[in-house]
């Protein structure tokens, strides 16, 4: 186990009807709020009205920024920064999923910064201060509601990059599983894939002696695997929605990664897909993760066999651990298929003519290697795209 | 799953040589420190010198209170409160295990309070303010390093009672597994029993639809069960000590109890043992918990069978779930025995002549019932003591 520091200060307010608490909770931190959201769905469901009422009831001024899209754009973040400065905003409230939250985080760090906010994402500047953020979560997936990271897409070159700091961890996150009843099956499945990927990026490690966090990771994966089919079959099954929502937060709040090196190659390899082809992040991960596993499993067959046995109840083959490991990857693909996700680039309609370009981008022109478990260079990444083809 | 609020702000600094960071971390919160510890063991091991050096290096004034004993006494807390007032102390640093931390918490709430500190423990007053606390942990067991609770013993009548508030959650906790190398096997085993009991008090619930936290609980129990025998056989096995230490914190930092009713009868039934006979809390729990399980398991055989199957790998007997449940209790007893713990009152040298008195005390003269899973009255508790006899 590695040395580590762990602190997650986000206050989680979880359960039925909790969104009405937003104003009461928010006034501890701010008085002039930017409300950030996506499209009109929160207006259709009535969530928008509830939130505005709670803000008004607590004498909180608000203005709005909407139109956040999946793979959220830095251009909208820049717009939000201007708006905050003009309106003297002191708190950002994100109502939505990961894209909305990541947009809010971008605005929060951009407001007090003189330069362009993309500087934080391309790594040229570190976060030193930020406006406080709060969240009302409507899509369990990204884990951004209690995480210290934000990922944005820059339309100028279609780069998708992330930044992070404890300073952008939300002050509070309101999680009402009922708000996820309206998520269509495909989006529910995308969320599941994203949650599982957050766990697996931490699970596949070279760090020895990590029993406890291994088991916590397995517990989280098993929870998602057993509850997502129910949530897809019965969209208003509170129990299943609640399990997925809480698992989604814990998957990415840093607990599961304590004391272990992490991988994150698959996330980076997927980022190129969603940046160029604008595919849903979860769907992209469902394609890339199994391909990555197949490419690297021989590096540590025992770990991939443990995944197969403990997460997917594969019988351990004592004479052939490789077979056990491969069977685990197969079961993961079967699971993704069973919940309606693609597992090949072909299913996403993506051809093989830009593998070189994507691999080049995510290795910064071949100068960087990716991944904590196995270091992957540009050629390795092209091979992984090829494995993901069909 | 129940609605819940979860926030744990304690900063965990985990790993080798981390105790040297104490002064640097502490100076963010205070300048005049009361250092609280037990006997001379921290002087023998050199830990005391390291801590004093780190405080001095960071220009932090300190004074000391020592002599904390297991089942810590309110009398020493009162002494500490006086000392803090005289010395204008603004931060309490606990160096030790649960007893030392709970003493520090008692002092932290007593200093700004006009009345007697026991008022918080007998429930007549709520905590409204407290001095900040920090911890350097030397005994993984109580989980007090990141918890919101404190348990003290009042020599006047030998009452053992607890209080709680987010205000007494430590600002930071430094966890270096190396500091636990000197724990003798019996104390290591006591710690294991205490950690497991913290999980099991949360695990045995009537709340439906708690898959995720069930699995997190099982993960924590399995980690303790698999690592404690190693730590006993090889006291300086870093990996095993580290797993136990991190599991001990998570077992009691409130995460595992999110969204579920909890039980806590066994803790209360045990408190009477340790208050009257001054037995180690962990040893008392190893005796009481299996007896409690036997007494209540028929209330929810499925849950006790799940415990047996998932925690102790018992084969589920589809024709006889009761047998499965009972086998789980048997395996728990075997585990406790294997690590040198008592499982009967007889082994603790406790006779049956004060069962009535103890049951009377923990039900407040027969007026209260105990337990979230099954409500237990005074007569039930006497029966549990009888089941624990031999």
Image (cartoon, coloured by chain):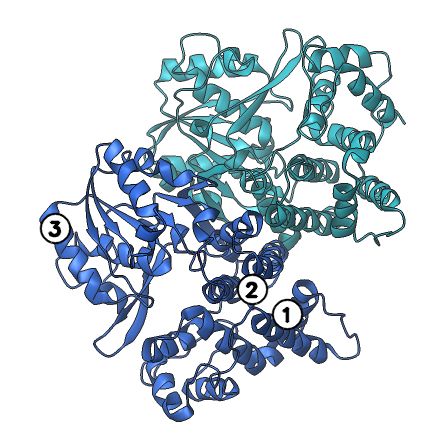
Chain colours: A blue, B cyan
| Residue A192, x across and y down, in percent | 51, 63
- Identify the residue under disc 2: A203
- Identify the residue under disc 1: A303
A151 lies left or right of B323: left
For disc 3, the neighbor class at 10 Å (few under 14, some 14 to 19, many from 20) is: few
Marks 1 and 2 on same chain: yes
| Residue A328, x across and y down, in percent | 65, 73
Q: CA distance from mark 1 to mark 2?
A: 9 Å
Q: Secondary structure at mark 1?
A: helix
For marks 1 and 2, the one nearer the N-term is 2
When asked about the image quadrant of residue B239, the answer is bottom right
Q: CA distance from mark 3 to mark 2?
A: 42 Å
Residue at 44 percent across and 89 percent down: it is A379
Residue at 17 percent across and 45 percent down: it is A89
Depth order, front residue of B330/B240: B330
A37 lies left or right of B364: left
Q: Are marks 1 and 2 in contact (CB under 8 Å)?
A: yes
Write down the chain letter for disc 2. Answer: A
For marks 1 and 3, the one nearer the N-term is 3
Write down the chain letter for disc 3. Answer: A
For disc 1, the neighbor class at 10 Å (few under 14, some 14 to 19, many from 20) is: some
Residue B183 seen in this snapshot: no
In the displayed structure, would residue B306 be above or below residue A362?
A: above
Residue at 72 percent across and 69 percent down: it is A314
In the displayed structure, would residue A171 be above or below residue A202?
A: above
Identity of the residue furthest to the left in this view: A86
Q: Secondary structure at mark 3?
A: helix
Residue at 49 percent across and 84 percent down: it is A384
Q: CA distance from mark 1 to mark 3?
A: 50 Å
Assign the N terminus of chain A to one quadrant of the image. bottom right
């Amino acid at each position: 186990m590695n040395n580590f520091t762990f602190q997650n200060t986000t206050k989680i307010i979880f359960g039925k009807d909790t969104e009405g608490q937003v104003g009461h909770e928010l006034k501890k931190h701010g008085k002039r709020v930017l409300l950030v959201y996506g499209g009109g769905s929160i207006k259709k469901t009535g969530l928008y009205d509830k939130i505005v009422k709670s803000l008004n009831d607590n004498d909180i001024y608000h203005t709005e920024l909407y139109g956040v899209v999946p793979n959220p754009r830095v251009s909208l973040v820049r717009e939000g920064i201007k708006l905050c400065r003009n309106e003297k905003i002191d708190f950002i409230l994100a109502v939505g999923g990961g894209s909305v939250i990541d947009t809010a985080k971008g605005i929060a760090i951009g407001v007090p910064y003189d330069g362009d906010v993309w500087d934080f994402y391309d790594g040229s500047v570190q976060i030193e201060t930020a406006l406080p953020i709060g969240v009302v979560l409507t899509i369990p997936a990204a884990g951004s509601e209690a995480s210290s990271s934000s990922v944005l897409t820059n339309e100028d070159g279609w780069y998708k990059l992330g930044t992070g700091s404890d300073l952008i961890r939300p002050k509070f996150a309101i999680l009402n599983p009922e708000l996820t009843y309206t998520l269509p099956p495909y989006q529910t499945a995308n969320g599941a894939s994203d949650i599982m990927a957050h766990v697996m990026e931490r699970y596949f490690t070279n760090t020895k002696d990590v029993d406890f966090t291994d088991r916590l990771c397995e517990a989280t994966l098993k929870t998602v695997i057993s509850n997502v089919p129910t949530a897809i079959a019965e969209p208003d099954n509170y129990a299943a929605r609640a399990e997925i929502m809480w698992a989604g937060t814990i998957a990415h709040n840093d607990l599961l990664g304590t004391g272990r090196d992490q991988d994150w190659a698959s996330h980076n390899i997927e980022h190129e897909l969603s940046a160029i082809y604008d595919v849903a992040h979860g769907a992209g991960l469902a394609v890339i993760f199994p391909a990555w596993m197949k490419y690297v499993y021989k590096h540590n067959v025992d770990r991939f066999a443990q995944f197969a046995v403990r997460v997917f109840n594969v019988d351990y083959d004592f004479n052939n651990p490789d077979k056990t490991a491969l069977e685990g990857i197969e079961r993961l693909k079967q699971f993704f298929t069973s919940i309606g996700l693609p597992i090949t680039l072909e299913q996403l309609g993506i051809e093989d003519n830009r593998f070189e370009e994507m691999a080049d981008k995510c290795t910064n022109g071949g100068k960087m290697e990716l991944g904590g478990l196995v270091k992957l260079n540009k050629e390795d990444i092209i091979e992984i795209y090829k494995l993901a083809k069909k």
